[in-house]
Amino acid sequence: MLEKIFRAAAILASGTMAGQLFVVAISPIITRLYAPADFGIFGIYAAVLYMAVSVVSLRYEVAIPLTENESDAQCLVVISAFVVLVVSSCLLSAILILPHFYEFDGWKLFQYTLPVGVCVVGLRNVLEYYRLRGGGHRRIAKTRMQQAMGGAIVQVGGGLASLGAIGLIAGQIVGLSWGMFRMLSPSDYREIWRNFKFRNALRNVWEQKDFARYDAPAALSAIMNTHSATLIIGFVFSPASAGMYALVQRVLVTPLGIVSNVLATSLISHGREIKSGDQSAFQKSTAGALLVMSPILTVAALLMHYLFGVVFGKNWMIAGVVAAWVVLFVGQKFVFDSLFSLLLTQGKQKRGLALQASLLIARHSVLLVCSLFLNFQDSIAVFSLVSAIAYYYWGRTILRSSEIESSVGISLSWLDLLAPYAVVWVAINFNATMIEVVAAALIYFSWSGSRAYPVVASLSKMRPWKR
């Protein structure tokens, strides 16, 4: 079963990452067409969009691949789509009323683009989960690649036309909704509607209520953990600072987030079949990946510090320091997000909510407090360190619930967590030359490699990626 999960994840990742690599490759062009303030407004829009999308269907779509009965799955498709339409309509009404009480720069961009974006992305997610139930990983991978490329091309066109933030927002909506209705065939739609029964709908709403009660707030907390920093930075520092963080999010955090998302999606799509032994092997593989990722991300952080402004333009020099700090905690975030999906397959939505809410409060309380006493760059440094500690601690909490915790405990140590921060801190604060930085990085790389080798050798014997 673990082999099927990794193969399905590889298929999903192939298309998704191909599209994301195109987005990263074209980002140096986009950063020269848009100002940091435009990116800041876009980052705020994207953050609100993703938060709203995470709960727009009350997470009933996640139950689609997990339910045993095909007719129940089809019933959940209709339920989820109906909830999306209702919630999107309520959001539109709220946005039209809210300006009477509160309004900010760029508000008019949100009035119609946000409800439209939430509706189309919510429907896309519903169709994707039903497609996953039937094993349509290749079609989803192809569609995701087209979505990423199409959205980036629209954003470039908006920049050439000097549309400002609206060009970035339009590209986001196009990219997230491209080809969504081709996910299923016309006969699939007819069959779903023909088999829908109101009595079954009520029964499924009640049976899957824990997704609405616990998983929806947990999903919102998870998305806020990823995106609400952009909102906070935009309000406590400046839109330009939010733009710096949003760009780093786009080229660094999002790609690894995609990998953890496809692992989680693949795991959920096989949730009906997975056994406890498969879960333990999945946990061990994911946790062991952190040792391999940490030295690579440390080198990436150093390169970001020195080269970010060169690649993306002189207006984005400060973003290089932000990128150096942010990239250090995405390894811990990747491991936590990947392991978190196991809680859903085990029916532990309530526990998942507690973990995500704790993470959200701890990380963003620190960011708000730092904004009162520190400048933007130092606040991001502290925020990154606290984020790494929080993701590491709660990831270990998930591992402690299984029998394999002792086997990965020695590989996931606090020293592995803190050493990359020491290396990057010295490089940034002591103006080290490139030669000194390379020498320090090689020493660290050798040390971490010697620790990673036994874990990698152990994982290679499992061969979860082979038939």
Image (cartoon, grey):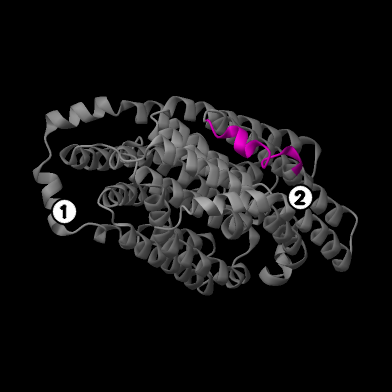
**Quarter of the view holding residue 87:** top left
Residue 115, image x, y percentages: 38, 47
* Viewer-proximal residue among 278 and 114: 278
Q: What residue type is labelled 1?
A: Asp
Q: Residue at x 74, y 64 (%)?
A: 303
Q: Which amino acid does label 2 sit on?
A: Pro
**Quarter of the view holding residue 69:** top left
Disc nearer the start of the sequence (1/2): 1
Residue 266, image x, y percentages: 39, 49
Q: Image check: 232 left or right of 284?
A: right
* Viewer-proximal residue among 43 and 393: 393
The magenta region covers 403-415
Mark in front: 1 vs 2: 2
The residue labelled by disc 1 is: 188
How would you rate the neighbour count of disc 2 (Cα within 10 Å): few for under 14, some for 14-19, many for 20 or more? many
Q: Image check: 199 left or right of 205?
A: left
The residue labelled by disc 2 is: 420
Q: Which residue is drawn at 13% across and 32% down?
A: 198
* Distance from Cα at disc 1 to Cα at disc 2: 50 Å
